[in-house]
Amino acid sequence: MFLLGFSGFMRIKELLPLQLKHLSFTQEGMKIFLEMSKTDQLREGETIFISETKSIACPVAWTKKYIALANITKEDFVICRLAKCKIGHKALGKYSISYSSALENIRIHLPENIDPKTIGTHSLRAGGASSAANAGVSDRMISKHGRWSLGNSRDRYIKDSHTKRFSVSRKLGL
């Protein structure tokens, strides 16, 4: 849930209804088809492209591993409920988790130095967009990837790093 939400700049209302049939894998990574998105006014659906990074936190590799372990089918929800069983947990793919369960899972996995009250479900979206902006990804590509139609909407999500903020006055040539 964290890696998909973060790397896809996804709203929780886009993430929770995802079914395995909405994911496809290519040599370059993974495509996620969103049947509905807040900014998809024509209801044509939108596709998110997530690259395979070969890093320890690669969202594509972890999604593939999760799918194999969860043993979910095409019609099952990707972010699904878990039931306790003798050998641990079993994925109940027919049932998506609730918004409140998603929020609770985000908050309980925070480092101890972060106040859970300051983190919400949009933190995955904002964190991904902020990381991309601070890594030098263009505003156009951030808007496209995050499905923002207006720059001012996008900019409210992005938290610039101190390095980027200092770079403004550094580039003044004073």
Image (cartoon, rainbow, N blue to C red):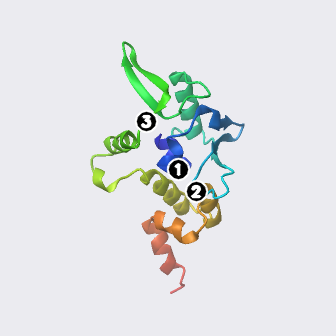
Crowd around label 3: few <14 · some 14–19 · many ≥20 (10 Å):
some
CA distance for labels 1 and 2: 7 Å
Q: Vertical placement of 123 versus 2: above or below?
A: below
Q: Nearer the viewer, residue 90 or 25?
A: 90
CA distance for labels 1 and 3: 16 Å
Q: Choose the circle earlier in sequence order: 1 or 3.
A: 1
Q: Nearer the viewer, residue 86 or 27?
A: 86
Q: Position of residue 174 (x, y in %)?
A: 50, 87
Which amino acid, by three-letter code, is at mark 2? Answer: Gly
Residue 160 is marked as none
Q: Secondary structure at mark 2?
A: helix
Q: Choose the circle earlier in sequence order: 1 or 2.
A: 1
Q: Residue at x 43, y 35 (%)?
A: 97
Which amino acid, by three-letter code, is at mark 3? Answer: Ile
Q: Position of residue 156 (x, y in %)?
A: 47, 67
Quadrant for residue 55, please give it: top right
**Residue 5 visible in the picture:** yes
**Residue 158 visible in the picture:** no
Q: Vertical placement of 163 versus 50: above or below?
A: below
Q: Secondary structure at mark 1?
A: loop
Q: Residue at x 53, y 47 (%)?
A: 14
Which amino acid, by three-letter code, is at mark 1? Answer: Met
- Residue wearing tag 2: 146
Q: Secondary structure at mark 3?
A: loop
**Number of residue marks:** 3
- Residue wearing tag 1: 10
- Residue wearing tag 3: 97
